[in-house]
Amino acid sequence: MPTLFEIYGYRIFFWSNEGNDPVHVHVCKGQPTAEATKIWLPPESNPVLVHNNSRIPQKDLNRILKIVAMNRDSIIARWYDYFGK
């Protein structure tokens, strides 16, 4: 699972076997898991929090959502490079 970047001690990453899902990232501190907080990046829309299983505090989560939104195009490009679609 590739780590895209780290911010405020949180890792933003893809989970390797989810290429058939809509474009999304996972967020966690420490060891990545498939159940980490999930954020979808729908076409031409703001990122959408699917769930916060990592229990990221709201203040940090708001900052992470803003950064994901600012890097949306880059994240989507890396998704398609990684998953080959």
Image (tube, helix red, strand yellow):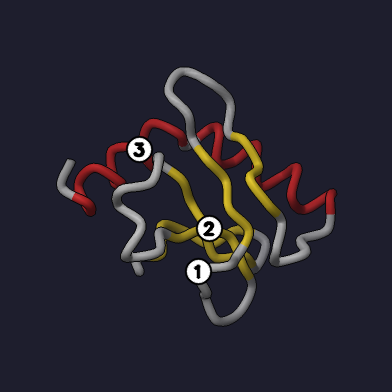
Can you say which quadrant of the picture contains the N terminus? bottom left
Q: Are marks 2 and 3 in contact (CB under 8 Å)?
A: no
**In the rendered view, would you say 2 is above or below 65?**
below
Residue 62 spot, x, y in % from top left: 75, 42
Front position in the image: 20 or 5: 20
Kindly identify which residue carries mark 2: 26
Kindly identify which residue carries mark 1: 34
Q: Which element carries disc 1, helix, strand or loop?
A: loop
Front position in the image: 45 or 3: 45
Q: Which element carries disc 3, helix, strand or loop?
A: helix
Q: Residues within 10 Å of mark 2 (few under 14, many from 20)?
A: many
The kind of residue tagged 2 is His
Q: Quadrant of residue 10?
A: bottom right
Residue 61 spot, x, y in % from top left: 74, 50
Residue at 65% x, 42% y: name it: 49
Kindly identify which residue carries mark 3: 76
Q: Are marks 1 and 2 in contact (CB under 8 Å)?
A: yes
